[in-house]
Structure formats: structure tokens, C-alpha cells
Image (cartoon, rainbow, N blue to C red):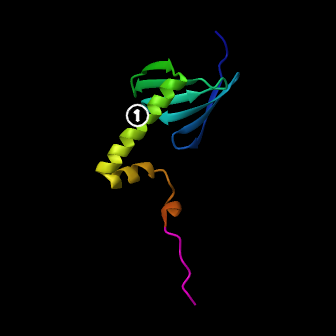
Amino acid sequence: MGFRFQKRISVLPGVKVNLSKTRISTSLGGKGATVNVGPDGKPMVTLGIPGTGMSYRQQLGFGHLIVAAVVVAAIVGIAYWLAPDLVQAALHWWQPKWFAAPIPVPAAG
């Protein structure tokens, strides 16, 4: 049994940089679904059931990644067409309050 080191640093909500003693990788996602890209550039997807410790991990080919991006874009587009306010709220939940505030316009003098 060997010594193991792993540290995760949260860069943005849903984006983490993973450090170990031998490599650095980036993870996108959260509980239940994560895409991890390591130094070799090969994306791995992990799907799991939060709280159970059970998960499935599979390497994604470039074609799989393109198809997944198109499917996600189509789902978001349909959801936006049906309920634009809900989609905008979901896409901007992570923004700080000052970012969403309107920019003050100086009065004409």
C-alpha cells in the first residue's frame, strides 16, 4: 500500500482543479455527474448516485463530447423556449449580487 495525496481547489462553482502527487486535472460538474480532463486531454465522465458511493466512470471520445454538448444545448434551448425566466435564474445562480446589479447611468447635466 502506497502513500496517496489528493487536493481539490474550487476555482468557480462546479469547476475544480485536482492536485495529486503525480498529476493535475480539472473537473467540471458536481454531485451526480462530473467530467474530468487530465494532462493527457482525454475527458472522463463519472455518473453516480450521491450519498451511496456508487458511480460509473467512462472515457469519452471526442465524438461523444460533441454529441453531449449538442444534446445539452438542445435541452437548454427547449427549456429556455418554454420558461426563459427559470433558465436565466438557473444559469446565473452563482453570480455575485453586485454582478447582476444594473450599472448606474450618470444624469445628464
Q: Residue at image x 35%, y 49%?
A: 80
Residue 34 placed where, x, y %? Answer: 49, 30
Give above or below for 73 relative to 90. Answer: above
Give above or below for 9 relative to 96. Answer: above
Q: Quadrant of residue 11?
A: top right
Q: Regarding mark 1 in the picture, which secondary structure is present there?
A: helix
Q: Which residues are magenta?
A: 102-109
> How many marks can you see?
1
Residue 60 colored magenta?
no
Q: Which residue is mark 1?
A: 71
Q: Residue at image x 42%, y 40%?
A: 73
Q: In which quadrant is the N terminus drawn?
A: top right
Left or right: where 68 falls relative to 37: left
Q: Residue at image x 39%, y 23%?
A: 52
Residue 107 colored magenta?
yes
Residue 24 placed where, x, y %? Answer: 67, 28
Q: In which quadrant is the C terminus drawn?
A: bottom right
Which residue type does callout 1 highlight? Answer: Val
Left or right: where 30 falls relative to 25: left
Foreground residue, 103 or 75?
75
